[in-house]
Image (spheres, rainbow, N blue to C red):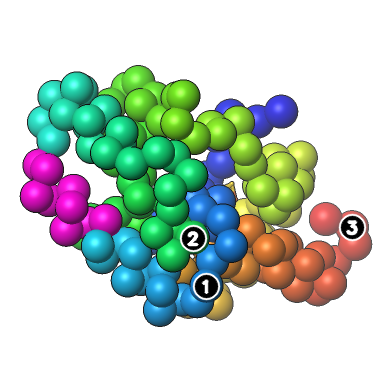
Amino acid sequence: MISFSPLCQLNGGCMGCCGYGFISVEKIKEAVAENTTEFQQANPQAEDDFLQFRNRRPAMDLRHGVCRNLIEENGCVLCPLHPARHGKDLRMGHCDTDYFCKTAKTFANWSPEKQQQFVDFIKRKELDNITYSLQMDKGMLLREFERNVPPNI
Ligand code: SF4
């Protein structure tokens, strides 16, 4: 079991597991833009403000299949409830924080050399963060990499 994956932070942030039944890249972008506007209007400062923002809708009340907490800041798609921001996980009780996609779980068992090769492989693709997220969660990048990686690594 893992509790962290560097893959979740790559490529401007991964949001592949921040939703369910995504409709299209355009609809995902639309949802993130609307979430970001709501977040900016709420302008949370204290922990209670962030929780109030989080609780404005039930967890499974998604927007075009996207979690309503997912926002964009400085070109990165991120969760403002994440422990990286607070030192405390404000997603607890609202989101399945133990979930990691197959790619992240497989990556965690690789050698450092193979992990670096996968990171380099992703960088060479120059994907936008939404396409990266979808391909990550669907295991497409993992499958493509595994098809091409030398068997001795
Ligand atoms: S889809 Fe995988 S890599 Fe992306 S955020 Fe979720 S666990 Fe991390």
- Indicate the amino acid at tag 3: Asn
- Can you tell which quarter of the image residue 47 is in? top left
Check mark 3 vs ligand 1: CB closer than 8 Å? yes or no: no
Give me the C-alpha separation between circle 2 and circle 3.
40 Å
Q: Which residue is mark 3?
A: 152
Q: Which element carries disc 1, helix, strand or loop?
A: loop
Residue 118 vertical position relative to residue 81 in the rendered view, above or below: below
Q: Which residues are magenta?
A: 35-43
At 75% from the left and 72% from the top, the residue drawn is: 144
Residue 134: horizontal and vertical position, in percent?
57, 66
Amino acid type indicated by mark 1:
Ile
Residue 56 visible in this rendered orientation of the protein: yes
**Is 65 within the magenta?**
no
Q: Which residue is mark 2?
A: 65
The C terminus lies in quadrant = bottom right
Q: Tell us which disc is closer to us: 2 or 3.
A: 2
**Dots 2, 1 in contact, CB < 8 A:** yes
Local SS, label 3: loop
Q: How far apart are the alpha carbons under marks 2 and 1? A: 7 Å
The residue at 66%/48% (across/down) is 101
Q: Position of residue 27 (x, y in %)?
A: 41, 74
Up the image or down, 126 lies above or below 11; here it is below
Tag 1 or tag 2, which sits nearer the N-term?
1
Residue at left 33%, top 41%?
Answer: 57
The one of 16 and 129 positioned closer to us in this rendering:
16
